[in-house]
Structures are given as C-alpha cells and as structure tokens.
Amino acid sequence: MIIPLDQLSHETLTAIIEGFILREGTEYGAEDVSKEAKIAQVKKQLEQGSAVLVYSELHESINILPSDQFKVGMEEEI
C-alpha cells in the first residue's frame, strides 16, 4: 500500500527517510554527503513521484522504493 506524503507530519517523514538512509547505506560517490543533503534528495524523489513510501502489511514495515520497482512488484503479485 502506498502511503500519501500528505498524511505524514514533517517529523515522521524525516524519521522514515533517515531510517531508510541508515538502513540502505546508500552510495553517493567519492564525496561525503551530509545526512541532511541525503534526506533532502530522498524527499525530493518522493515529492516528484520517482520514489514512493510503501507499507507492507505482511512485514508491518515501511520502505521507500523506486516507483517503477513498486509497480513491477505489484504486477508480479497479480
């Protein structure tokens, strides 16, 4: 299930993104990128629709996925 961004407070969204960044260990190249910059990048992707917040009832967890990956995953379940 996709979670609409407007249903989350700023603090909650930031905490979800921060957890995602720490969990995924995302690679940003040779330069160090601040946590704030990483959060801003992920938030922008969510706002632009290239990434989505997804709640898994099975795992009772929230994850951030590329929107095209989420659509593919949904088609495989059908």
Image: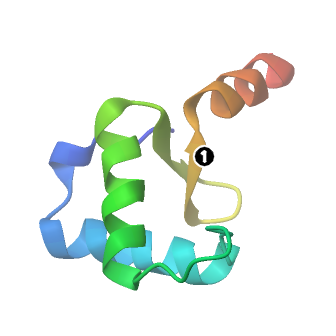
36 relative position to 58: left or right: left
**Colour scheme shown:** rainbow
Q: Which residue: 67% across, 75% down?
A: 30
Against 29, residue 51 (above or below) is above
Give me the residue at 38% from left, 57% from top: 41
Residue 46, compared with residue 72, is above or below; it is below
Q: Amino acid at mark 1?
A: Leu
Nearer to the camera, 32 or 78: 32
Q: How many marks?
A: 1
Residue 51 left/right relative to 12: right
Please identify the residue farthest to the front as the structure is shown.
30
Give the farthest residue toward the right: 76
Q: What residue would you read off at disc 1?
A: 65
Q: Is residue 68 left or right of residue 75?
A: left
The percent position of residue 16, horizontal first and vertical second, equals 40, 71
* Image position, residue 75 (x, y; %): 77, 16
| In this view, 18 is above or below 26 | below
Relative placement, left or right, of 26 versus 38 is right
Q: What x and y, as percent, mark residue 47?
A: 28, 39
Pick the front one: 58 or 44? 44
Residue 66 lies in quadrant = top right
**For mark 1, does the 10 Å Cα neighbourhood hold few (<14), some (14 to 19), or many (20 or more) residues?**
some
Badge 1 element: strand
Instruction: Give the quarter of the figure containing the C terminus.
Output: top right
At 14% from the left and 64% from the top, the residue drawn is 9
State which quadrant residue 10 falls in. bottom left
Residue plotted at (40% across, 43% down):
45
The percent coordinates of residue 24 (x first, y second) are 68, 73
